[in-house]
Amino acid sequence: MRMLLIHADEMSFEARQKTPIAEEEPPTKSASVEDCLVVFAAVQEADERDPEAVVKAAADEIEDVAGELGVDRIVLYPYAHLAEDLSDPKVAVEVLKGLEEELKGRGYEVTRAPFGWYKAFTLSCKGHPLSELSRTVTPEAVEEEAEEALPSRYMVLTPEGDLVEVSCSEDLGDVPEDFRHLVAHELGEGGEERDEEPAHVRIMREKGICDHEPVSDVGHVRWYPKGHVMRRALAEYVEDRVVELGAHVVETPVMYDLTVEAIREHADKFGERQYRMRAGNKPLMLRYAACFGAFSVLSDAVISHRHLPLMVYELSNSYRLEQRGEIVGLKRLRAFTMPDLHTLCADMDQAVEVFLEQARMCLEMGLDLELEYETVFRATRSLLEERPDLPHELASVIEEVYGGPKHVLVEELPERKHYWECKVDFAYVDTLGRPIENPTVQIDVESARRFGITYKDEAGEDRYPVILHCSPTGSIERVLCAVMEDRQKRFEREGVLPTFPTWLSPVQVRVIPVSEKVLDYAEDVLETLKAEGIRVDLDDRDEPVGKKVRRAATEWIPYVAVVGEREAESGTVTVTVRRESTPERQVKEEMTPEELAERVLEEVEGKPKVPLPMPERLSKRLEFGPAA
Ligand SMILES: [Zn+2]
C-alpha cells in the first residue's frame, strides 16, 4: 500500500459521481475536518496476499506519524493515482474499511472518504518539514515479524538425568500426573478447554477475599479486607526477601510513552496483548511488568562492576489485555500485581550463576506457600549448545529444594524469538489439571543495549550488562489462586483440611466465648494475642457456639480458641488446631493464651506481621461476598 500523508489545517471533500467500481454504501459523501492527518492511500496488488497484515502495518506507520505530529484526527482518502499495480477494488475497500476500524480501535477519530467516486476536495497543508511524507507498506514486513517460524523441540529431563525428546504426552511413560498435565498443555494437547469453573473462584467468594469488579473493565478485581491483608502480607514477604538479597526497591509509573523507540520495541517483543491508549495526542500503554520503569531508572544510574549483580525491585501493578473469554478467577486477569526483580549481571557467566540462585529462591518461596511447582526450562538452541549442563544444573537445584529429583520439561527454541536467551517457568497444576504459571526467571540479552544501560568494567570501559527478569512468586493474584487450588486438590485427594499458611491467613486466631458471662475474659485473651502482633478476632455475636465454630472452620482459621467458665477460671483456652485436625476428628488442646501466642509466633517467625484491617469484633464487622 502506498500512502501520502499530509498534515493539514483543513481537508474538505465531496463525492460527486459514482464510477463503475464505486463502494456500494459510502461511509460519508462529504466532510470537512480541521487540524488532521490526511492519508491518501492506494491499495496494491501485492496487498491481496494478506490484507490484514497490510492494515496492521499501515496503522503502525500512521500511528507513528500522527504521534509525532500530535494529531488525533485522521482522514482516510482513497487515491488510486499513487500506484499503478492496483489491487482488486473489493480488496481495496476491505483494506480501507479495516484500516478505518483499526485506527478507531487505537483511539483516533477517523473520517473515511468513499472509494470509487469522483470527488472534489480542498486541502490546506501546514507546510512544516514533517507535513508531507510518503510511506509504503507490504504484507511481508509484518509476516516476517509475526512468523513464529520454526517449531520448538521438547525434551524431558528425567530424574535419572537423561534428556528424552517428546512429541506428545503419550511418549511420557510413567510420570507424575501433574507433570503429564504440564507437558500436555505445553504441547498444545487437551485443547478441549473445559468450561468448568476452577475451585478457587468459589473459595475466594465464599471466604469474602475478593471478587470481580462489575463497574471496571473485565479482569479487574476488588479486594475485601481479608484479601487486602493477604496481599499485604505477600507483598511484604517478597520485598523482605529480595532486600535481604541486596535489592534496591523502587516505584515507577504504570504508563509509558510509545513514541519512545526503546519502549515500543520492547513492548512489541513481549508479544502478549497490551492496554494501549491515547491521552491527548500521545500514544501510551499501561505496563505489563516493571521492566520499563526499572530500565529507565538503571539507564540514568552510574553503575560500576563493583555493584554487580545489581538488583532493582518493584511490586508492579501491571496490565495485559487478555481476551475476555480467557479471563478466569484470579488465574488470568487484565489487572494484576507482580513482584518484579531485575538484576544486572556483568556477563553471561554471572547471569547463569544468578539465574540458578534465583530459581532456588522461587522454589523456596513456593515452599513457604506450601506449593510445589512443575518446571519448564526454555532456551535457544545456541545457548543449549554452549551450556549443555544448564538444564542439569537447574534440575539439581530443584532436587535440593524438594529433597528428591523431579522431571523437567525442556523447550529448545531454534532461535531467539523474544528478548531472552533462556527462562524457567514454574507452574502450579490446578485441580482441573491446568498449569498456573507462577514464578519465572529470564536471561535477557537485548534490553541493556536497547535502553542504554551500561556499567563501567575494571578497565573503566562502558559495557552492556546481561539483565535477569525474575518474579519470585508470580503475580500476587496467581499465588493466591494457586494456594486455593492446592488446598482444594489436597482436600480432594488426601482428605487434608484446607488452610492458608498461618502467616498468610487473614485471621490467625479466633476467640469464641461460650456466653456473655465470659466475654470479659475473652477480651483479655484477644488483647494478649493482639499485643504479640497476631491477627486475632472475637466472635461476640449472640449465636450458638456450635454455629460460631462451624463458621470459623469455613473461614479456614488455623486456631480457634473457645472460652467457657472453666477456661476463665483456670486462665486457659481450648484451642482447635485446624492443621492437625481431619474432617472426622478435631484436635483440641488446652493451653494458656501466652502458650497459644508462642505457638503462633513460632509458626510465623520471619514472616511479615500485618495487622488485621477490619474490626476485630464480629458484631461490628461487615461481611463481604456471598458468604455474608
Ligand atoms: Zn522485566
Image (tube, grey):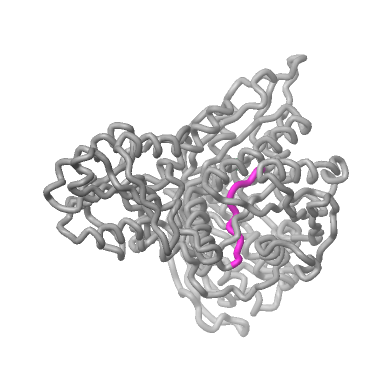
- Quarter of the image where the N terminus is located: bottom right
Is residue 332 visible in this depiction of the protein? no
Residue 568 placement: quadrant: top left
Looking at the image, which is closer to me, 591 or 507?
591
Which quadrant is home to the C terminus? bottom left
Q: Position of residue 33 (x, y in %)?
A: 43, 60
Near-viewer residue (14 or 368): 368
Q: Position of residue 27 (x, y in %)?
A: 48, 75
Image quadrant where residue 595 sits: top left
Residue 440 in the magenta stretch? The answer is yes
Q: Is residue 547 visible?
A: yes
- The x and y percentages for residue 59 are 59, 59
The outermost residue toward the right is 385
Residue 310 lies, in percent from the top left, at 63, 27
Task: Please state the extent of the stretch shown in magenta in the rendering.
Answer: 433-441
What type of secondary structure mainly makes up the magenta span?
A: strand
Please give left or right for residue 197 compared with residue 550 in the image: right
Residue that extends furthest to the top in the rendered view of this protein: 459
Q: Residue at x 64, y 50 (%)?
A: 426
The residue lying toward the viewer, choosing from 203 and 80, is: 203
16 in the magenta segment: no
Q: Residue at x 43, y 63 (%)?
A: 583
